[in-house]
Amino acid sequence: GQQVMQIPQYQHVQEGEDFTTYCNSSTTLSNIQWYKQRPGGHPVFLIQLVKSGEVKKQKRLTFQFGEAKKNSSLHITATQTTDVGTYFCAGPDNNAGNMLTFGGGTRLMVKP
Amino acid sequence: DSGVTQTPKHLITATGQRVTLRCSPRSGDLSVYWYQQSLDQGLQFLIQYYNGEERAKGNILERFSAQQFPDLHSELNLSSLELGDSALYFCASSVSHRRENTEAFFGQGTRLTVV
């Protein structure tokens, strides 16, 4: 079945530094979604990318969808302590009812 | 508030027991997913229902089962519980099973502890 990998698994940064997490799928995705899970919380939808090469921005967050629609990245500029959490990418599995397959997540820790 | 309600929030039970986790999806959402998240782990897909029918199955143990009722709420039944079943169980819902409508809204989760 479809596999979605994310790197790195963990990332420690100093507040103000940039952060990037990368997501790779074993299959071409119709769309890629990003979620954030705060410590002790539940995953919350951030954004969905649909088009090849698409780039979307949300304040300090920049999301990219690869040209081949098999990879994606999330970049955070000038991290803040409020960015702490685990970031997951997810893609619908076309061969399995479009159920969302999640990457393993990248846990971001920010030192003030 | 995502609009997805899960009960109970916490559950402590003994090995060998059976429990039922309940999920009410967002109003209008027909698709319900169940995920298991062990400590510091990712989200492991268990099962998906769409409008009462099983749509997709992940690595769900035979001891686990689920169903979606006519009012669209779903229940996840876990039986013959083992210590390793201790985890956070999330329910999520989406508008449909169509790939363009798979944005998922998660409930707060049920934290299951098996002792």
Image (spheres, coloured by chain):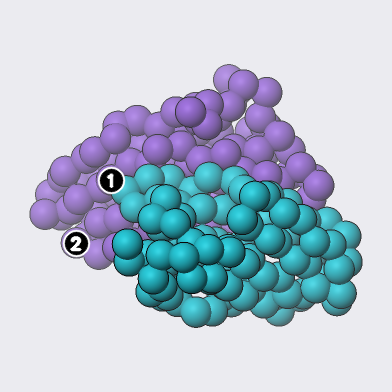
Chain colours: A cyan, B purple
Q: CA distance from mark 2 to mark 1?
A: 13 Å
Residue A87 x %, y % = 51, 61
Mark 2 lies on a secondary structure that is helix
Disc 2 packing (10 Å; few <14; some 14–19; many ≥20): some
Q: Earlier in the sequence, mark 2 or mark 1?
A: 2
Q: Chain of mark 2?
A: B
Q: State which quadrant residue A53 falls in.
A: bottom right
Residue A46 visible to the viewer? yes
Classify residue A104 as left or right of residue A27: left
Q: Nearer the viewer, residue B107 or A36?
A: A36
Residue at label 2?
B83
Q: Position of residue B67 (x, y in %)?
A: 52, 38
Q: Secondary structure at mark 1?
A: strand
* Three-letter amino acid code at the position of disc 1: Arg
Q: Quadrant of residue A74?
A: bottom right
Name the residue at 45% across, 32% down.
Answer: B23
**A29 vs B74, nearest the viewer:** A29
Badge count: 2
Q: Amino acid at mark 2?
A: Leu
Q: Which residue is mark 1?
A: B111
Where residue A34 appears, as percent x and y from the top left, is 62, 56
- The quadrant of the rendering that contains the N terminus of chain A is bottom right
Horizontal arrangement in the rendering, residue B71 relative to residue A25 (left or right): left
Residue at image position (16%, 43%) is B12
Point out the frontmost of discs 2 and 1: 1
Q: Eyeballing the image, is A85 above or below B95?
A: below
